[in-house]
Image (cartoon, helix red, strand yellow):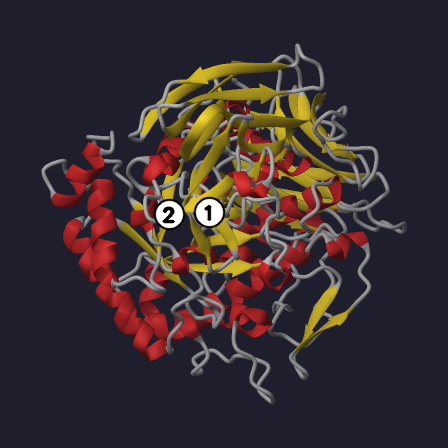
């Protein structure tokens, strides 16, 4: 039963009243310091937690996808760069996101290779190797290889006087290489390759070499582990399945504002390699529409597809919906079928534009013009498939204030309803043409946004406060939502939702960051009446990986802890130790109330399972001291046997890294629910399961 609480926000209802918790937890007349206590009111419930809260976000940000999920061993496999002895040009403007480091080099002198622009197989040019008696060819070094079989292909053409072979090299000895002949004629042909690599190495090499006299041309080369799954790494797919990601936002991000999806479908060897103008990195366009949607199927995630409203036009939005969801009898559905997928992908969730309120987005226009563009896009897309669910760029006042907006001297704070409040304009001009608004947050560490100067200032935060920074930004957005409801009463009906589809804090893969993630999840649970999805940046951060191996990271483990063991129906939590009040003026990154339960310094969240036969109480101890907590569970009769799952590590820097013993894990434990007090390890997250007596 859900209990309505008039004149009280949902967050307040779930938190309960601190003084009530104090009354239930303290003995009358106590003269000593009170025992830290929490009251769990199992009869006071909130809106269910959508599994989409455990979503992820991936983006073609440099080589992130190409060097993690995708199994291709080679870089620049379609020769965007000329084949010569020069290194890859450095990142444009020093941009660290352009991480591609490998390219093809001649095996001999530069003069043995020229670039053919007239008869290129794909892109601007293809290499031509000139063989004059001595072996000549092209090679790529610094390959990460494992002791396993590899498969690939080469698109080749050769004059009659030239014999061509491919050699995979994993060491310096004569027995640490394998060569295969490549039959070739004067016309382009695709020849399969197969190798058995004899050892693990980070410094492998492939060479394509000709002997005899004449020339040969190479159009494209591919090399993947033979155990790849649809082109994706088998180990990464297995770990993503283990993560049980319910929603995957892709393929961007900023990347999509200059993204042309039509470059990413069809024969992969014929897809044009391009220089992405957003992240200034070469994209081979191998991991395209069909590949990413196939990956979502492989990991059992709901795809949440982003489309470009930057350089693209409404017709493109309609065409990609038809390509993805249209019957094979439609124009674009027929092209999908011809590309190997006759059945529609049936993608329901669509992200129409990314951060289009920002001047950094390709195709950014004034908001009054963008509202028109958004409506044209949605109308065109829904004309193709009326069933799709649309999320649109939010640009809430807190987000626009703290760095996502355009700073105006003397006006550092974006007021609700002002000309700079993008979300307000979306409500005013586009209501009915979206089902959810997106919001993004990446709070800086040990920083505070000064509402007078509009600048971030350095602050010193103890661990407990530091761990709440992401949760604080969730609450600033919730403050905005409450304000918007006073201007747009339709929001009170709960039909419009918020997708927190980019969020992250502390981009280090350690236990310290896992504490902050747990705090953020607790804050999401307090706002399930309107926050319906969240996508963590990046989903690949759930793993630690190199080019051949991977493990679940510390951050991945905390997501697993809640995804696998927390309940789905939030219940009210109160306590006897209120969270300290705001330190700073309200606005920007300072919410109206500081986040957390009234169990300071611990943070407590609780939820019933779907069948209501178990109650899970989650406690985050973001201190470096052990803590005790008295739990008063009301409205739920528990048996004498309980289970718990504890996540911790030896120190805040603890990590799970490839090639090393894991330092952060989930330990299954038992406890007696009727004792009433639980002990919390330092720097830990623990979930306690209470089960009904008759279970």
Q: Residue at point 85% right, 44% down?
A: 624
Residue 292 rendering spot, x and y as whole percentages: 39, 37
* Residue highlighted by disc 1: 80
| 669 is higher (above) or lower (below) than 530 | above
Between 60 and 497, the residue placed more toward the observer is 60
Q: Kindly indicate the quadrant of the structure image that contains residue 449.
A: bottom right
Residue 342 rendering spot, x and y as whole percentages: 19, 30
Q: Decide if residue 356 is on the left or right side of residue 204.
A: left
Question: Is there a contact, CB below 8 Å, between mark 1 and mark 2?
Answer: yes
Mark number displayed over residue 123: 2
* Of the image marks 1 and 2, the number of the one nearer the N terminus: 1
| 191 is higher (above) or lower (below) than 262 | above
Q: Decide if residue 339 is on the left or right side of residue 507.
A: left
| Residue 48 visible to an observer of this rendering | no
Q: Residue at point 46% right, 68% down?
A: 395
Residue 268 rendering spot, x and y as whole percentages: 35, 36
**Residues packed near mark 1 inside 10 Å, few (<14), some (14 to 19) or many (20 plus):** many
Q: CA distance from mark 1 to mark 2?
A: 7 Å
Q: Kindly indicate the quadrant of the structure image that contains residue 515.
A: top right
Q: Quadrant of the N terminus?
A: top left
| 562 is higher (above) or lower (below) than 27 | above
Q: How many marks?
A: 2
């Amino acid at each position: 039963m859900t209990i309505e609480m008039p004149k009280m926000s949902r967050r307040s209802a779930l938190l309960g009243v601190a003084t009530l918790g104090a009354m239930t937890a303290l003995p009358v007349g106590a003269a000593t310091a009170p025992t830290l206590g929490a009251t769990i009111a199992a009869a006071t419930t909130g809106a269910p937690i959508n599994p989409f809260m455990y979503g992820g976000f991936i983006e073609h940000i440099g080589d992130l996808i190409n060097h993690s999920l995708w199994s291709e061993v080679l870089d620049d496999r379609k020769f965007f760069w000329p084949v010569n002895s020069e290194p890859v040009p450095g990142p444009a403007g020093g941009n660290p996101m352009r991480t591609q480091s490998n390219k093809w080099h001649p095996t001999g002198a530069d003069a043995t290779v020229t670039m053919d622009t007239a008869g290129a197989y794909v892109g601007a040019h293809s290499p031509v190797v000139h063989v004059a008696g001595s072996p000549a060819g092209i090679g790529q070094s610094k390959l990460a290889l494992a002791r396993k079989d590899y498969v690939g292909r080469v698109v080749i053409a050769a004059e009659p006087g030239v014999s061509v072979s491919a050699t995979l090299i994993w060491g310096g000895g004569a027995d640490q290489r394998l060569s295969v002949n490549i039959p070739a004629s004067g016309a382009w042909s695709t020849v399969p390759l197969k190798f058995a690599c004899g050892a693990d190495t980070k410094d492998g090499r492939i060479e394509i070499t000709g002997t005899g006299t004449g020339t040969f041309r190479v159009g494209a080369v591919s090399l993947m582990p033979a155990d790849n799954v649809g082109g994706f790494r088998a180990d990464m797919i297995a770990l993503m399945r283990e993560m049980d990601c319910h929603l995957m936002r892709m393929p961007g991000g900023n990347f999509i504002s200059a993204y042309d999806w039509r470059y990413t479908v069809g024969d992969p060897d014929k897809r044009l390699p391009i220089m992405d103008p957003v992240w200034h990195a070469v994209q081979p366009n191998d991991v395209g529409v069909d590949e990413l949607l196939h990956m979502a199927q492989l990991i059992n995630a709901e795809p949440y597809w982003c489309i470009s409203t930057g350089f693209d036009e409404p017709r493109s939005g309609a065409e990609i919906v038809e390509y993805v969801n249209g019957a094979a009898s439609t124009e674009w559905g027929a092209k999908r079928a011809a590309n190997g997928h006759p059945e529609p992908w049936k993608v329901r969730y669509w992200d129409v534009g990314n951060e289009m309120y920002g001047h950094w987005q390709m195709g950014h226009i004034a908001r009054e013009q963008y509202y028109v563009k958004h409506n044209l896009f949605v109308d065109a897309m829904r004309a193709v498939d009326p069933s799709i669910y649309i999320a649109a760029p939010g640009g809430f006042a807190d987000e626009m204030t703290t760095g996502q907006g355009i700073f105006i001297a003397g006006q550092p704070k974006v007021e609700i309803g002002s000309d700079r409040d993008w979300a307000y304009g979306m409500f005013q001009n586009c209501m009915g043409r979206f089902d959810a608004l997106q919001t993004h947050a990446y709070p800086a560490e040990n920083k505070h946004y000064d509402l007078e100067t509009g600048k971030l200032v350095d602050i010193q935060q103890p661990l407990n406060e530091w761990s709440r920074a992401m949760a604080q930004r969730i609450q600033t957005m919730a403050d905005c939502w409450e304000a918007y409801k006073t201007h747009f009463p339709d929001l009170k009906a709960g039909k419009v939702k918020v997708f927190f589809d980019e969020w992250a804090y502390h981009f280090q893969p350690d236990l310290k960051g896992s504490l902050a993630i747990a705090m953020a999840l607790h804050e999401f649970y307090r706002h399930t009446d309107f926050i319906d999805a969240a996508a963590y940046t990046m989903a690949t951060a759930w793993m630690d990986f190199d080019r051949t191996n991977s493990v679940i990271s510390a951050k991945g483990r905390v997501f697993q802890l809640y995804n696998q063991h927390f309940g789905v129906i939030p219940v009210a939590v109160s306590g006897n130790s209120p969270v300290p009040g705001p330190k700073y003026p309200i606005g920007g990154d300072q919410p109206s109330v500081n986040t957390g339960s009234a169990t300071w310094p611990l943070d407590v969240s609780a939820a019933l399972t779907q069948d209501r036969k178990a109650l899970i109480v989650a406690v985050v101890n973001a201190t470096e001291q052990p803590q005790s907590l008295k739990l008063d569970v009301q409205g739920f009769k528990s048996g004498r046997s309980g289970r718990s799952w504890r996540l911790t590590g030896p120190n805040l820097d603890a990590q799970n890294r490839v090639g090393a013993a894991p330092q952060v894990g989930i330990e299954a434990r038992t406890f007696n629910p009727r004792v009433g007090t639980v002990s919390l390890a330092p720097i830990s997250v623990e979930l306690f399961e209470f089960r009904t007596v008759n279970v």
